Image: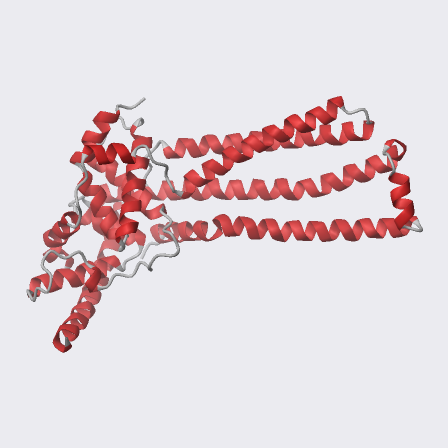
Amino acid sequence: MELDELKSLINQKLTTAHAGRSGDDIAQILTRKTVSVIDKLKRSLWIEILCCIGAILLFAYFGFAGDNHAYQVYFSAFTVLTTIFLVIVIYLLKRTQQLSATALPVKSNLQTIVNIIETFMKRYFQFTMGLMPACCVFALLLIYHDHGSIPDAGTIFGTYFKSSWQMVLFLVVYAGALATGIYYFTRWYLKRLYGRYVEQLKQCIRELEEQD
Amino acid sequence: MPDEKEFIALLNQHQKIVYKVCNLYMDQHADREDLFQEITLQAWKAYGNFRGDAKFSTWLYRVALNTAITFFRKEKRQPDIYATDQVPDNHENSHDPIEEQVKAMYAAIGNLSKIDKAIVMLYLDDYDYKEIGEMMGITANNVAVKMNRIKTRLKEETQKNEANYNYQTRWN
């Protein structure tokens, strides 16, 4: 039999297979929390915002109140970097909130969700990876220019390394290993959080765009 | 701030739409409950922007389908595979051939992709291709092509499901 011949019976089956809810039940549901990925993302963005604000306040405090010039430059630079990230996170949160408040056509809705999640993943990845060279460059520059003001720096390096090339080699290997570790960990973490979900949504978009 | 009482009254009046979507997209009772809650909450969040340009039922369909398509079911539960014995049934152990065909068709619809399910659901509710296209964000022509393919697939699947069902009842 064809779908058209069974249309009304299927329709009836779909609507009768439930226990109706009262107005009170619906009112009670309205007090609960959503479990959608977009709302989870929204919660993550809020956590990022709070962490960023905390970090900015801490970095700014060390940047301005610290008595060591090296630390002042180091923490001021990170105050700026974290502020840039904060702006991006606030922009993403705003876009997510706009999406929750509108009923877009299915395809546009899917595209917007994919776009928001991918932007979040991209910026998060860039920020995490950007911190690595920034930390190394600032640390090396400050050690080079201002090593006198860093307490015990000479003693620490003098104890473990007999010559400067050994120290440079150690720093290169250390930075390389740390960067590789952070690169793969961040990629794995983001993929685990959103990768499979984004792929499923992309599959739906491909299906919608498909012209048989 | 949107009027909560007005929203509850409207949703109560149109809750069959939400149940239809839940029944079609989820095969487990707990999953249906989760999806019902999620659709209700998403509709409530978006209700402030509902201007009344479209009918409430059309708007609710859009919210419900968007939520169902993007809903991530908890991994531990059963896969989304419909079998004829999982179909909601008001006439258990019925040997009515029409009822068996409905069961087979229902199971076949349950095995469609999320997008195809949405198109079938709107088609069953007598929306025309243009309206379905507007809701899905594709052209009416594309809807017609997809609907043709879906109908052919459902016919084949139904025949298979029916054959399985007849085989099972014969040997049980």
Residue A25: image quadrant is: top left
Depicted A14 relative to depicted B156: above or below: above
The image shows residue A111 at horizontal and vertical percentages of: 41, 43
Q: Nearer the viewer, residue A66 or A144?
A: A66
> Furthest-bottom residue in view?
B171
- Identify the residue at image location x=31%, y=56%: B113
Residue B40: image quadrant is: top left
The image shows residue A174 at horizontal and vertical percentages of: 77, 51
> Furthest-left residue in view?
B96
The image shows residue A117 at horizontal and vertical percentages of: 48, 42
The image shows residue A35 at horizontal and vertical percentages of: 38, 42
Instruction: Kindly tell me whether residue A97 is visible in this rendering.
Output: yes
Judge left or right: residue A89 versus residue B132: right
- Identify the residue at image location x=29%, y=36%: A29
- Identify the residue at image location x=77%, y=27%: A72
Q: Quadrant of the C terminus of chain A?
A: bottom left
